[in-house]
Image (spheres, coloured by chain):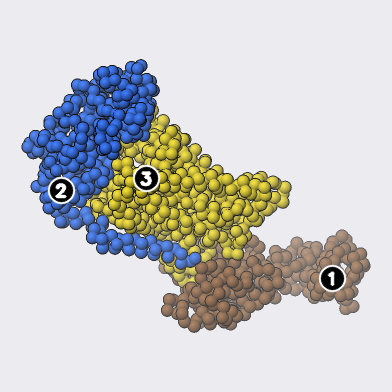
Chain colours: A blue, B yellow, C brown
Amino acid sequence: MPRLLARTLRALLVTGLLATAACGSGGDDPAEQLAAAAEAGELVVYSGRNENLVGPLLEMFTEVSGIEVATRYGGSAELAAQLLEEGDRTPAAVFLSQDAGALGALQDAGRLEQLPADTLATVPAQYSSADGRWVGVSGRSRVLVYNPDLVAAADLPKSVFELTEPQYDGKVGYAPTNASFQSFVTGMRVTAGEERTRAFLEGFRDNDPKAYEGNALIVDAVNEGAIPFGLVNHYYLYEKASEAGGLDKLTARNYLFPGADPGSLVNVTGVAVLAGKQSQDAQAFVDYLLGEQAQTYFAEVTKEFPLIEGVQPDVPDLPPLSSLQGPKVDLSQLDSLAQTLALLDEVGLT
Amino acid sequence: MTELLTGAPAPASAPPAGSAEPGRRAVRAGRRSRPPLLLVVPACLTAAIALLPMLYLAVRAFEQGAGVVGDVLLRERTLRLLIRSLLLAGAVTTACLVIGVALAWLTVRSDLPWRRGWAVVAALPLAVPTYVAGFAWISLLPRLSGFLGAFVVLTACSYPYVLLPVAAALRRMDPAGEEVARSLGLSPWQAFRRATLPQLRPALAAGGLLVALYALSDFGAVSIMRFDAFTRVIYTSYRSSFDRTPAAVLGLLLVAVTLVLVWLEARSRGRASYSRVGRGGARVGATVRLGRLRLPAVIVPVAVATLSLGVPAAALLYWTSVGVRGGFPALDVGGAALTTLTFAALGALATTVLAVPVGVLAARRSGRLPRLLERASWAGHALPGIVVAFALVFLSVRYAFPLYQRTPVLVLAYAVLFLPLAVGAVHASAAQSPPGLEEVARSTGARPLAVLRRVTLPLAAPGIAAGAVLVFLTCMKELPATLLLQPLGSQTLATRLWTETGVAAYSAAAPYAALLVLLSAVPTYLLGVRTGALDRPPGGRG
Amino acid sequence: MTAQSALALRVRGVHKSYAAPVLTGLDLDVPVGSLVALLGPSGCGKTTLLRVVAGFERLEAGTVEVGGQLVAGCSETGRDRHVAPERRRVGIVPQEGALFPHLSVHDNVAFGLPRASRRGPRPEEVLELVGLTGLGARMPHELSGGQQQRVAVARALAPNPSLVLLDEPFSALDAGLRATVRAEVRASLCAAGASAVLVTHDQQEALSVADIVAVVRDGRVVQAADPWSVYAHPADLGVATFVGETIVLPGRAAAGAVSSPLGAHTTSSPAGGEVAVVVRPEQLEIGPADLPCVDAVVAAREFYGHDALLRLSLPGGTTATARTPGHPLPEVGARVRVGVRGPVVVFPA
């Protein structure tokens, strides 16, 4: 008993050292990686997109370019906040963000490097920063997923604002906590104004919408006919289609609200180079993400839209980029999620 | 008499001339003898480390002027948030006190069947991270969101914080009080309520405080259950506005709430000291026969275990089975487990070492400074991990850049977050060994440092070790600070789990979650066994 | 060699107060090699004195010298001095022994020795001194209470302290054991040639083991002398009644002759006029042939085997207790003749 403490502490120390040694012998001692990254000229990337998705892509990049990459994964917003705290001493050279809002916040804080014009020119202007400090890599669109067995195509609403009307009472599924639903609301606030958005949300709320935990569950429910409509991102249907062996095996279909409707907002995954971190390697990384290999990879794995012309991903039934609708909005402005959440909270859609 | 007086005397109340022979109590009064610098200097360092996030929060909160701080504080939403969070913390704490006391009593004092086994099982939910339990519950009962969901998950995961100290106190407690009460004509229940329960007050207060702060600072449960408590709003505030002022103001408010709770806990202990200074170990109270209720009583531990362990286990099994059907993706479970153990072990080590001077000082001296230092060590405990992480990002980037995103800063974050777990353990166990021993040691010529090393620490060792194990366990489950501060390229089980659930790959996540729970179960088991068996005084029958 | 240097402990004018004054100008001398008992009721300040001497409390005025070295108080240079406890060479034996529960008997005894000599012969030597040879490997809880106490003494003696302080070391032992352990500890201290201060509130203990009994009252020593002197010639009525059992009777004294309800006595006390007459119970004899006697009635009796106490009602309504041999014992209600053997002590009334 008296030696218990000494034993416990020793056990902790030994565990720590052994495990460190074990990691070290595995070739990548985590404690040394940052220093190694800086010294060996590795490119440090902060990625707001999941490791399972980005990891293989980064390996392909290293293979192609010979540039080693060290990556920190996290939530896009948390990483953006971390980059803001780090200031100009950040170890990161490149930030890959899940959505444009986080990039907009960094841009406003003067933390992003100006990108070359020819880089920006590779994607349509509306999918990059108006200031030219970040560039979109892949796109995703908000859609209304519907069940053609329950609703005739001709009866589909012409605008998302129609969902507050009585005929949609109890018929629309949505995922209130999902980030893409929230950024849809942000997009509506930015394009249609606060008052109109509030009115829509209140009407939507009073129309007894069905809350789901995630978009995939909504697509399932629509496909099975449990509900006729759902507000989701476009790719959930294609993911389900690739599992099922083709879109023709499914009942549900995506519907894009025509014109500049906030219900068809297109958001992007974007990449930026951090202020003072411009380098050939960083530029090579950005260019790689905009190249055919990465664009195809993104589209095939995530079923998102490639943002450059001429890429033909092997995703059956994915409509071309040019078919996308949605409002013309500076995506950098989608960084006011706080107001969106406050509004959702006030309206009671949480 | 001396035993009863070992508590810190109130400065205002003069001891009557008749009892002026101060005996041991003078040691703790320490009015004339200054606290040794040897303890004070490192204890101040520890307190300073615990207060680091405050520095950051103050910088961030006031960078836009005090007016903005006032605006955030006076928002109606802030008040609602405060009330909601306190309601949740209050409800969870109450439920945990009831469950903790009931299970502790059943496993320590009654003739419940297999009570040794139940004593260990009852501690195991500590091994289940709230984000795992939350996912399990929500996948089982999707409708269980909001207050009720957060309440269920937090209660199921945190009641052992009450159970462990109460069970230990029940074992230590001199049964004489209860026996006297019975002899005076009180029923067993009355005797428990009027003689036993009051003696459990320090354990209840300490455990209740930990639970309350856990409920305030936990993010996993409230985010999965979509209940807008402090932490969730602080997170979404970072996540959504990129304006760090409101988050910082709310963080400061949370620290203030924490310190009020810590102060309340100290008050609720009252002035009396409950430590036994008598010789030898106390007898263990006679086992209470449950009679006809003996078998039905098993329902209590079974129900608690089902809710706290069964649900997560079922969900993990389900996910894993789905994964088996779909074929396992390549997993780096071993590497992540090793990294987890490394970080947690170093975190526990650092936290314990930092906690020793504060805990010993608080146990031995009753002045204002020791009390202040001990309370300061709580400052970081109720803060969400992400706030502490940002604070350390801010500070280490500016003042310790070579260490930034290296293991030491992560370990420091663990220390800031979990110091009170270790400080409490050190304080409680150091307070239990009679100070007379240290005086004897010094009179034989041992210097204060030698006394600490050769007498105080060895005697407090079991308690300190239990505290270290608790910190170890908590570090293993930590997610938000680890994500931001871990060295580039490293992965813990928790961050792997986060990665997999991030792409809804629950079947790929399940092995990480299962391994995390199983690995955490080892230290938890040790904690349970310790309070279940080793803590029994020698010769006592359990 | 001055008289001072022959003292193991010299305490002068020590003042100490918590909320109320506890020590009020206390003086005490402990000659080298002697055992001094500090005798006083609970709360008289004796434990505080011990703590001041050991260095756990700071004094407010006065001086403490251990082995001729000033360890606390004002030095000649006017500097306030407070030597740390570990540098005073003062061993303590606390009330309940307070053995380190995590250390074996050997390690307890060796605790205060320099690291090098912990493995040497000294611990076993001291254990032998206290009569516990061969028990070094035991853990404290494997010892009886008396053995624990002797280990505590051995632990205090091991580093050869200038002075050993024993704080009511026998109070936790049961009565049967107490006398034996007392004698053994006394013998160990003698064998070690140690100077010691024993704090106690038990006058029997003080009288039986000490070379010098120092009676403490209200924070000062009111009498310090050998046990017989303290018993036979108490400094005042308070000491008289505290040390040993007493019968206090009203009386009149003049020029060495005293009269009281027990008859006429002699005294060496100088007081005259109305006095308080102090008689010890063993001075009363039942039916002695060679003493002047008075009549008394046995009101109650307590039989102890080796002797007995008789409560006697005296003429004039006063009562007195007599310690008599256990046999023959008069019945309750019996009329007896009672006389007082030896001189009595008187104090001004």
Q: Amino acid at mark 1?
A: Ala
In the image, is residue A256 above or below residue C159?
above
Most extreme residue toward the top is A166
Which residue position is annotated with label 2?
A61
Q: CA distance from mark 1 to mark 3?
A: 111 Å
Q: Which residue is mark 3?
A: B322
Q: Do the residues bearing badges 2 and 3 touch, measured as CB atoms within 8 Å?
A: no
* Mark 2 vs mark 3, CA separation in Å: 33 Å
* Percent position of residue B262, x then y: 46, 45
Q: Secondary structure at mark 2?
A: helix
Q: Which mark is on residue B311?
A: none
Instruction: Tell me the residue at 11%/35% (across/down).
Output: A310
Are discs 1 and 3 both within one chain?
Answer: no
Q: Is residue A334 above or below residue C319?
A: above
Is residue A286 visible in the rendered image? The answer is no
Q: Quadrant of residue B387?
A: top left
- Tell me the residue at 51%/58% (across/down): B529
Residue named by callout 1: C264
